[in-house]
């Protein structure tokens, strides 16, 4: 009986200490400052157009997006279908996904005037966004720059950045141009909650 009480007390102490821990995964120290190049790009599509990051529902509607599922808003005719695949083709903000009330991903599409090679594509988007990526993975239909989930602080927003590229030279897509889909996942609420948690300790 005494042993059982001791185990319950020990478990309770461990749970309390775990509850007092702030989730270090969202510590702002893990987010590096946005490069000058990335700031210019995000300013052009968000700040200069008075669009929040992440966008609000009225802002999405003003951009012409419509609700296509419980979690997703998208511009009409934003993708081109090929067999069972779909490729984004509408430049600018074209898709918004909310996974829960804390995490969302905004898609920003950049269209190139021609088809790029793999090497030229990685160099182009490192120059455009600020040299965050040193490598890539590629299939016949998509290139993803790596490392994935690059953590960045842009003004008061804390984001993860990924880049998917479609329509490269000699790939299997029917696209006539190269498109880069920049995925901006927002973690600002979690980071702000971490900072509040740290202040209250």
Image: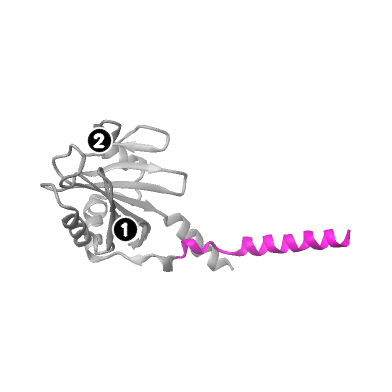
Q: Position of residue 82 (x, y in %)?
A: 24, 32
- In the image, is residue 128 part of the stretch drawn in magenta? no
Where residue 201 sits, quadrant-wise, is bottom right
Secondary structure, magenta segment, majority class: helix
Kindly identify the residue that appears in the image at 78 percent across and 62 percent down: 9
Between 174 and 63, the one lying in front of the other is 174
Give SS at disc 2. Answer: strand
The magenta stretch is: 1-27
Kindly identify the residue that appears in the image at 42 percent across and 56 percent down: 188
Where residue 147 sits, quadrant-wise, is bottom left
Kindly identify the residue that appears in the image at 35 percent across and 32 percent down: 68
Please determine whether, in this image, residue 19 is positioned above or below residue 64.
below
Q: Disc 1 or disc 2, which is closer to the eye?
A: 1
- Which numbered disc covers residue 59? none
Q: Kindly identify which residue carries mark 2.
A: 79
Q: Which sits earlier in the primary sequence, circle 1 or circle 2?
A: 2
Q: Position of residue 8 (x, y in %)?
A: 78, 59
User: Image check: 136 left or right of 169?
Assistant: right
Q: Kindly identify which residue carries mark 1.
A: 146
């Amino acid at each position: 009986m005494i042993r059982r009480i001791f185990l319950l007390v020990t478990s309770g102490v461990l749970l309390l200490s775990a509850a007092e821990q702030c989730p270090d995964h969202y510590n702002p120290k893990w987010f590096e400052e946005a490069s000058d190049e990335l700031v210019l790009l995000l300013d052009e599509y968000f700040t200069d157009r008075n669009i929040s990051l992440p966008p609000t529902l009225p802002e999405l509607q003003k951009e012409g997006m419509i609700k296509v599922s419980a979690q997703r808003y998208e511009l009409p005719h934003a993708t081109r279908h090929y067999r069972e695949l779909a490729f984004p083709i509408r430049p600018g903000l074209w898709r918004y996904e909310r996974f829960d009330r804390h995490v969302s991903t905004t898609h920003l599409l950049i269209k190139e005037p021609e088809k790029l090679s793999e090497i030229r594509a990685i160099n182009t988007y490192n120059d455009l966004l600020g040299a965050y990526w040193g490598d890539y993975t590629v299939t016949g239909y998509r290139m993803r720059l790596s490392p994935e989930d690059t953590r960045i602080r842009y003004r008061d927003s804390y984001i993860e950045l990924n880049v998917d590229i479609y329509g490269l030279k000699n790939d299997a897509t029917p696209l006539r141009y190269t498109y880069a889909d920049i995925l901006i996942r927002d973690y600002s609420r979690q980071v702000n909650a971490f900072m509040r948690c740290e202040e209250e300790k």
